[in-house]
Image (tube, helix red, strand yellow):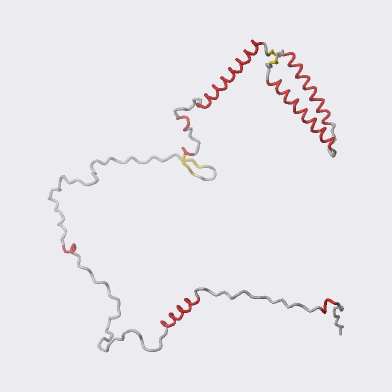
Amino acid sequence: MSEVVYPPESVYNNLPKIAVLTQKPPRYMSKFRSTVILEEKANKETLRTMGPAKEEVASPDRYTKKHLKEPKLPSKEFCHSCTVKKPPVPARTDNPPMGIHTKRDFTKTTTLVPMKPQPTCVDSKGHKQRLEHSGLVPKYLKKKDYGEVPEYLIQRNEEKQRAQEDYENFLKDQKEQGAIKLMPDMERQSLLEDLKKNWDKLHHEYQGLSLVTDTLSKKAHKEQLEAAMKQLEDDIDLFEKFKTIYLPNH
């Protein structure tokens, strides 16, 4: 037989264990309990068959006769209209009554025109719809204002033209006063070439930077080069976009 191994002796095994008392919640009691009990008793009273019957018993003279329990049809009510006879059918020799008008005059009705089939279209998936709602019919060509310039575009062009005229008048006044002068084309081209050369130098230096910016100095130098290149790009776009450039005359 195998020996039974008990746990080793310990001070914690000798401590008394505190019994934990669990208190159950109160049992659920429905508020309709008393009503259900009364209804159940009342229903049981009606199903009892022992004892004397509570309904009145027929006397011996009123015994069940033949065909007494068969269903009877309701009695036909007397209809006064059934007794009135309809006028006789007119003979072939009688003349038809003239001058009688009904709600619908069949003499004035015209022949109905057969309905024309509506043009429809069916797509590749089998969906069927009216042709005018499919977008294949150029119905916008029949509009009254088709091909005309909208009013908001006319107003926008007028405002743009007015602003251009105001700017030209301002430049004309400044030239008359001698406050501005026109930059020559050769000077503009030389400045544009110098800006592009400076951008190429900065771009060459930017391409030689280290891929890893692990120090603050490297990060600051990279941001400085990017800002300078962005400023040069804006200046180059300005000189290429505007052929006429005015300079203040100091």
Between 170 and 120, the residue placed more toward the observer is: 170
Q: Position of residue 210 (x, y in %)?
A: 85, 35
Q: Position of residue 187 (x, y in %)?
A: 75, 14
Q: Quadrant of the N terminus?
A: bottom right
Q: Is residue 44 above or below residue 233?
A: below
Between 97 and 73, the residue placed more toward the observer is: 73
Between 12 and 2, the residue placed more toward the observer is: 12
Left or right side of 164 for 203 = right
**Displayed quadrant of residue 115:** top left
Q: How many marks?
A: 0
Q: Position of residue 203 (x, y in %)?
A: 80, 28
Q: Residue at x 81, y 34 (%)?
A: 220
Q: Is residue 20 above or below residue 128?
A: below
Q: Is residue 103 above or below residue 14?
A: above
Left or right side of 217 for 102 = left
Q: Quadrant of the C terminus?
A: top right
Q: Position of residue 77 (x, y in %)?
A: 22, 68
Between 233 and 29, the residue placed more toward the observer is: 29
Q: Residue at x 26, y 72 (%)?
A: 74
Q: Residue at x 81, y 33 (%)?
A: 222
Q: Residue at x 48, y 79 (%)?
A: 37
Left or right side of 217 for 41 = left
